Amino acid sequence: MPPSSPTLEPRLSPGFPWGGRTAARAAVGAGRVVLGRYFPLTCEGRERVPAGPLVVAANHFSHLDPVVVAVATGRPIRFLAVDELFGRSPFFDWLTLWLGAVPLPRTRPPLGALRLALAELDAGGTVGVYPEGMRVWVWGEVPAKRGAAWLARRAGVPLLPVAVAGSEEALGRGTTRASRKPIRAVVGEPIHPADFAGFPDPVGDMTAEWQRQVGAALHRAYGLREP
């Protein structure tokens, strides 16, 4: 039983806390079964997940999204999580940090979090980022931030787009009750930093390509005409 106080401290080195990687892998398997039956969840494109270290970047509608993205990619992921998520529930803090989350401060430059993310990638791990920086009501509500592309380029690893559709109806902003609504996750084509080496703004162009792929996948998932 996790302690109620103090909460687990963030792991400031590559890898997961003791037992965390095993728990993260178990969560992927359990999430595949539970989400697949309850909502249901369908995943597309897992064959596009490359081997080796990776930055996974997804859109963000719901608290369910980290589990959905981990199930879609089949990987234990250390997500960058804004520090304002912590401090409300000791159990949530303990569980989130045990599963490898990296707190990301909003009120100061996140140098420590970025250094830890780069160390995780250098050790062969997978880092998860939400370029929107927050849960949003609708896609396109806020411009994508450049951090995910910057990490991928700095570490020399692929940036993998993942689009999550329907989680806003299953457990979106403004609600604490889950609804049995279908969720669909689509893994996009890896974005390789080397392909953007000659561009005037490689990080900006990688971010634009991430936004293009995720936007197109969401339009298809919702049956909308692409812009």
Image (tube, helix red, strand yellow):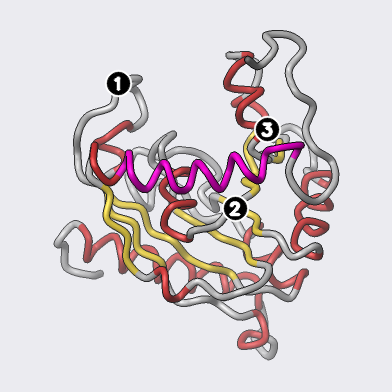
Q: Residues within 10 Å of mark 1 (few under 14, many from 20)?
A: few
* Residue at the bottom extreme of this rendering: 198
Q: Position of residue 66 (x, y in %)?
A: 49, 44
Residue tagged by mark 3?
A: 98
Nearest the camera: 14 or 65? 14
Sequence-wise first label, 2 or 3: 3
Look at the image and tell me in which quarter the C terminus lies. bottom left
Q: Amino acid at mark 2?
A: Gly
Residue tagged by mark 1?
A: 177
Residue tagged by mark 2?
A: 128
Structural distance between the alpha carbons of marks 3 and 1: 24 Å
Structural distance between the alpha carbons of marks 1 and 2: 25 Å
Sequence-wise first label, 3 or 1: 3
Magenta stretch: give its range: 17-35
Q: Amino acid at mark 3?
A: Trp
Of helix, strand and loop, which one carries label 1?
loop
The answer to whether the residue labelled 3 contacts the one labelled 1, judged by CB atoms less than 8 Å apart, is no
Residue at x 55%, y 53% (from the top left corner): 131
Structural distance between the alpha carbons of marks 2 and 3: 15 Å
Looking at the rendering, which quadrant does residue 43 occupy? bottom left
Look at the image and tell me in which quarter the N terminus lies. top right
